[in-house]
Image (tube, helix red, strand yellow):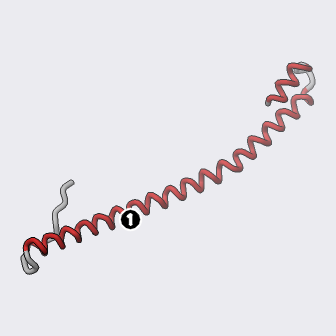
Amino acid sequence: MIRAFTAITTQGVGNPAILAGGISEALITTAAGLAVAIPSLIAYRFLRGRVDGLVVQIEKEAIRFSDALLQHQRAGVFGVGDEAAKQPLKRRA
């Protein structure tokens, strides 16, 4: 576009052939930019979805692990045969 505006400044708008070079160059660079940007955006969204899924899975496993630790701790404090240690813990929101 810079070349197109430079051509207008130097030679006026009377000759469209002079403008065509700058406009075609701008269109080519725009197409090249889109050819890079669109696949990049698709890959980003795909990978972001996978990461979000892994985060949810890790959080679920962390909750299971903390529940197991609490059960183990309760079993050690109250005794192995105590019924309270066998009950699942209630989570607070």
Residue 51 position in % (x across, y down): 47, 59
Q: Identify the image quadrant of the N terminus.
A: top right
Residue at the image point whose x is 86% and y is 22% from the top: 8
Which residue is depicted at the point 82% across and 33% down? 23
Give residue 75's quadrant in the image. Answer: bottom left
Which three-letter amino acid code belongs to the residue tagged 1? Gln
Task: Please identify the quadrant where the C terminus is shown.
Answer: bottom left
Q: x, y percentage for residue 64?
A: 28, 68
* Identity of the residue drawn at 86% across and 19% down: 9
> From this viewpoint, which residue is outermost toward the bottom?
81
Viewer-proximal residue among 25 and 84 = 84
**The residue tagged with tag 1: helix, strand or loop?**
helix
Q: Does residue 81 sit above or below 33 in this rendering?
A: below
Question: In front here: 87 or 68?
Answer: 68
Q: Quadrant of residue 76?
A: bottom left
Q: Position of residue 73 (x, y in %)?
A: 16, 70
Which residue is labeled 1 in the image? 57
Left or right of 31: which side holds 76? left
Residue lying at the far front in this picture: please name it.
Answer: 76
Quarter of the view holding residue 31: top right
Nearer to us in this view, 90 or 17: 90
Give the left or right position of residue 76, taking residue 9 as reference: left
What residue lies at 92% left-to-right and 24% top-to-bottom? 15
Instruction: Tell me: residue 84, above or below residue 35.
Output: below
Number of labels in the image equals 1
Q: Is residue 81 above or below residue 9?
A: below
Q: Within 10 angstroms of label 1, few (less than 14), some, or many (20 or more) residues?
A: few
Q: Position of residue 57 (x, y in %)?
A: 38, 65
In the image, 75: left or right of 10?
left
- Using the image as rendered, state which of residue 59 and residue 20 is in the foreground: 59
